[in-house]
Image (tube, rainbow, N blue to C red):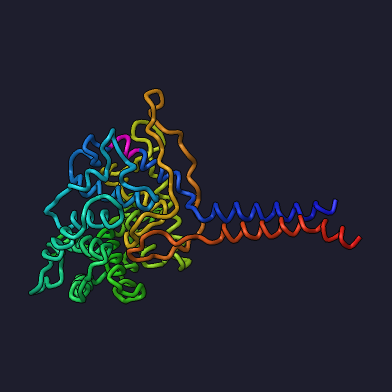
Amino acid sequence: MKRLPSASVIASVVLLLASTAASAQSPLTSNAQRALQWLQCAQQQPNGQIGKGGNPVARSSEVAFSLAAAGQAASAMRTGAVSLADYLKTAVSTDVGTNGELLLARASQPGTGPTATLAAQLQASKSISGQTAGEYGGDVFSDALAILGLRADSQAVGQDAVDFLKQQQKSDGGWSFDNADQFGTDSNTTALVVEALVSAAVAPDDASITRGFDYLQTVFGQGGFGNTPGAGPDPNSDELAIQAILAAGRQSNPTWASMLNQALNYLAGQQIPSGADAGALSGFSELFATTLAPAAFVLRALTVTGLAETKVSLLACPTSTSTSPTPQPTATRSPVTTTARLAQTGATADLRPPLAGLVILLLATAILMRPRRRARRR
C-alpha cells in the first residue's frame, strides 16, 4: 500500500515526459509529411527532379530545403534508383536567384554537390559600381535569394550588399520585386529581404526590418498573409511571411505570435485533403505553393541550414488501390518560441526529455531502496 503514492508520482512524471516530448514537435508534422508525400509521389520525375516544367532547379532546391527541415536527406526522396540528391549534384542554372536557392539546398543537404563553384558564380554576379552597387543579379528578389544562399554557405556578404537592400525599401516599408518599382511592393519580396538582412547579421530590431514587418502586418487578413494590402491570403505569401517571423524571432511578441499561429492554421487549411493531389497546397500553382510548405509547417526559416535533428518520417506512396492518404485533422497551434539560427548544422537538442527520464530513474531507485532501508531499521 505504501508504494501506491510513489507509483502515482511516477505516473505523473511519465505523463509529464510524454507531454514534454509531444510539445517539442510541431502539431503540424502530419501536414509536412503529406506535402512531402505529394511532392515525391506526384511530382518527382525519373531523373530525380521535382516538377516537369517551369524552373525545376528552383523547385527541387526548395524541396531539398524542406526535407532538411524535416531531418531527411535529399537522397531519401527518390523515384526508382534515382534520388533528388542525384539530380541536385549536376543541376545548373544561369539565373542568380535560382543559384541562390541551389546553394541554399547544397549547404543544407549532404551529397547534393559542391558549393564552391556556385558561391563563386554568385559573388561574380554582384554589381560593384553605380546605383546598383552591392546587388546580386538584376532584381531585389534574386538579390535576397543570393544572399541567403551565400550566408548558408558561410560566405561573406559585404556592407554594400546590406546598404543596397536598405536603400531599396519603399515608403510603406515594403520592397518591390524589381529595382525600378514597376510592380510595386509585395509581401513575398519583403519577407525574403527581411530574412536576407537577418542572415547578413542585421539586428532584428533594426529600423529597416521593423518597417518591413510594419508592411507585412498590412497584408495580414482573413487569418493569413496575402501578397499585397487588401488581397486575400495565399499559401506562397503565407509561407514566406511565416519564415520571416521565425527568422527575426518575432514569435516571442504576442501580436506576431497570434498572427503566426493563424497563418499556420490557414496554411494547413489550404492543404488538399483527398484525391490525386492530396497533400498539395491549393494555389495558382500547386507545386509552387507546396515546395516550401513542409519547412513552414515544422517552423524552419530560410536562415537555418543543415538537417534537423528531429526527423519527420516520410510516408510511402499510395498504392493503386488507395490513391490518396487518409486525411489527417489539422491542429490548432499554440504560440511558439522558436529562435532563428544562422547556418547551423542541425537543430539544438532538446534536453527536457532526457532530464525527465533522469527524474524517473531517480524516483524508481528511491522506491526500490525504501524496503531495504526499512528492513535494516527492523
Q: Give the side of residue 328 with respect to residue 285, left or right.
A: right
Which residues fall within the magenta stretch? Answer: 38-43
Q: Is residue 86 above or below residue 304?
A: above
Residue sitting at the far top: 321
Find out whether residue 371 is within the magenta segment.
no
Q: Give the side of residue 345 with respect to residue 356, left or right.
A: left
Q: Quadrant of residue 23?
A: bottom right
Residue 334 in sight here:
yes
Residue 269 in sight here:
no
Q: Quadrant of residue 39?
A: top left
Q: Is residue 18 above or below residue 216?
A: above
**What's the residue at 43%, 49% (across, down)?**
311
**What's the residue at 42%, 33% (across, down)?**
325
Residue 178 percent location from the top left of the image: 16, 62
Q: Is residue 252 above or below residue 47?
A: below
Residue 225 percent location from the top left of the image: 35, 56
Which residue is more in the foreground, 172 or 25?
Answer: 25
Residue sitting at the far left: 130
Residue sitting at the far front: 376
Residue 306 percent location from the top left of the image: 34, 57
Residue 29 percent location from the top left of the image: 45, 47
Where does the C terminus fall, quadrant-wise?
bottom right
Q: Main secondary structure of the magenta part?
A: helix
Q: Is residue 167 above or below residue 243?
A: below
